[in-house]
Image (cartoon, helix red, strand yellow):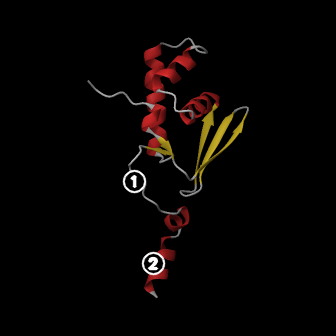
Amino acid sequence: MEHPITTQDFLIAPSVRETTSEDGAVLLDIEQGICFSLNAIGLRIWELLKKLHSVDEIADALAQDFSVPRSQLLSDVTEFLQSLEAKRLIHQPGSTLPRQAWFSRIFPWIKQRATAH
C-alpha cells in the first residue's frame, strides 16, 4: 500500500517569507531570490499546510467551498504541494536543500573571482 502524501511530510523552507492580501499571497524565498504568487485558494492551502493539516483534511476543507469532485481536489492539492517542493519552498524532513544564494546564481563570477585571489 502506497503511503499517501501528507503535509506532515513537508516543512516550509526557513528562508520563505509571505505577504498576504485579499487576493492571495506572495511567497518570497530570500535565499533563492524568487517570488511565488498564490491566489486565494493557494493561500488557503498554504495556511492549512502551515497548520500541518493532511492532504485529506485540505481536500475536505476545499470541498466545503467548491462543488468539485473530491478526487480532483486531492489531485490538485498534491500537484500544488509538488510545485511548492519543486520551487524548494517546502521540503521533506531530512532532505537537504542545496544552498546557493540568488546573487551567486545571477553573478557567478563573484564566487570565482573571490576564490581566484
Answer few, some or many: residues within 10 Å of disc 1's Cα (few below 14, many 20 plus, some between 14 and 19): few
Instruction: Find out whether the residues at labels 1 and 2 contact each other: C-beta distance under 8 Å.
Output: no
The amino acid beneath tag 1 is: Thr
Q: Position of residue 20 (x, y in %)?
A: 70, 39
Position of 54 relative to 114 (above/below): above
Figure label count:
2
Residue at 56% in and 11% down: 67
Q: Give the residue at the far bottom of this rendering.
A: 117
Q: Position of residue 99 (x, y in %)?
A: 46, 60
Answer few, some or many: residues within 10 Å of disc 2's Cα (few below 14, many 20 plus, some between 14 and 19): few
Position of 105 relative to 55 (above/below): below
Instruction: Tell me which label, 1 or 2, sits earlier in the chain.
Output: 1
The amino acid beneath tag 2 is: Gln
Residue 58: numbered disc: none
The secondary element bearing badge 2 is classed as: helix
Residue at 38% in and 49% down: 95
The secondary element bearing badge 1 is classed as: loop
Q: Position of residue 13 (x, y in %)?
A: 52, 48
Q: Nearer the viewer, residue 106 or 1?
A: 1
What distance separates the C-alpha of mark 1 from that of mark 2? 24 Å
Of marks 1 and 2, the one in the foreground: 1
Point out the image quarter for the N terminus: top left
Residue at 55% in and 51% down: 14
Task: Quickly name the residue at label 2.
Answer: 112
Q: Position of residue 84 (x, y in %)?
A: 49, 41
Position of 103 relative to 7 (above/below): below
74 left or right, relative to 34: left
Task: Quickly name the residue at label 1.
Answer: 96
Position of 9 relative to 114 (above/below): above
